[in-house]
Image: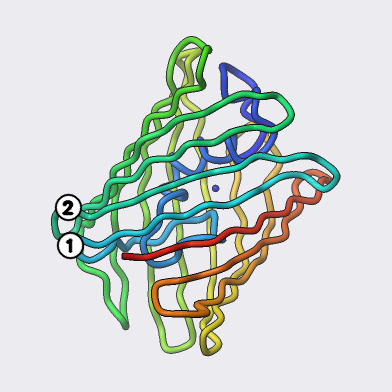
């Protein structure tokens, strides 16, 4: 997951662009199985030669917010490559990012596994890049899934910020609901809940509602798998 990165170019985006930075550090943004609208990532990737394309809007209540486009693809077993393009409708800033996620152990229907992530973010017309590194753990049970993320951001100002995230999700037929918390050093945590609905094979719509330091955060999106 992702808020209030004040140093560097990411501070220009009030919502998901700063949030995407933390998300990358936590391996939050381009998950293969947990996916939107979760901000906390899962330790899973798409099947080899598979992937998805996600598009969503996110913003604070009463704001224009930001739009996002995020493709992901798995060229090899256990490895997933992702990208993101984010546009802030208020500050008119654009953020671009690349991410790779690789599994340490294979995903399990019952049990735990782990993954690592690395990402690079750049705000157009701003100096420097943000590097993000993260560790991801997932435990699947008959009741649902638990996800834990721990990572760090290296900002253009050349200092590191630790970040964290925890999430629980449960499938209820074609609808999966979740609750999560995530944050980083120097900012208040975000608490969020959401749901996704697989309304047709390989098609998903989703939404989330969150609170961060007195602000209400909203998002809605669509995903196409392949």
Task: Please indicate whether residue 209 sits to the left or right of residue 11 in the image.
Answer: right
Q: Which disc is residue 200 wearing?
A: none
Q: Position of residue 42 (x, y in %)?
A: 40, 61
Quarter holding the C terminus is bottom left
**Percent from the top left, x then y, of residue 10?**
57, 25
How crowded is the residue under tag 1: few (<14 C-alpha within 10 Å), some, or many (20+)? some
State the colouring used for the structure image. rainbow
Give the residue displayed 38% in from the left and 41% down from the top.
83
Residue 99 image-quadrant placement:
top left
Identify whether 104 is placed above or below 19. below
Describe the element under mark 1 as helix, strand or loop. Answer: loop
At horizontal 37% and vertical 54% (from top left) the residue drawn is 136
Residue 56 % position (x, y): 58, 52
Q: Earlier in the sequence, mark 1 or mark 2?
A: 1
Label pair 1/2, CB-CB below 8 angstroms: yes
Q: Which residue is mark 2?
A: 75
Q: Which residue is mark 1?
A: 48
């Amino acid at each position: 997951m992702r808020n209030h990165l004040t140093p560097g170019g990411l501070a220009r985006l009030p919502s998901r662009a700063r949030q995407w930075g933390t998300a990358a550090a936590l391996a939050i943004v381009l998950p293969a199985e947990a996916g939107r609208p979760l901000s906390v990532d899962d330790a899973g990737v798409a099947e080899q030669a598979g992937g998805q394309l996600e598009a969503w809007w996110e913003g604070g209540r009463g704001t224009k917010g930001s739009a996002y486009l995020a493709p992901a693809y798995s060229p090899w077993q256990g490895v997933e490559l992702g990208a993101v393009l984010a546009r802030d409708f208020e500050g008119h800033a654009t953020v671009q990012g690349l991410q790779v996620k690789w599994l340490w152990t294979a995903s399990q229907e019952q049990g735990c596994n782990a993954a690592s992530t690395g990402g690079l973010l750049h705000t157009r017309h701003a100096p420097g890049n943000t590097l993000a590194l993260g560790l991801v753990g997932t435990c699947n049970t008959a009741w649902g899934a638990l996800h834990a993320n721990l990572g760090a951001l290296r900002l253009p100002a050349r200092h590191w910020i630790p970040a964290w995230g925890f999430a629980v999700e449960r499938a209820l037929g074609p609808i999966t609901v979740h609750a999560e918390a995530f944050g980083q050093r120097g900012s208040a945590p975000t608490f969020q809940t959401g749901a996704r609905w697989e309304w047709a094979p390989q098609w998903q719509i989703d939404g989330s509602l969150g609170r961060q330091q007195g602000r209400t955060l909203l998002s809605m999106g669509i995903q196409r798998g392949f």
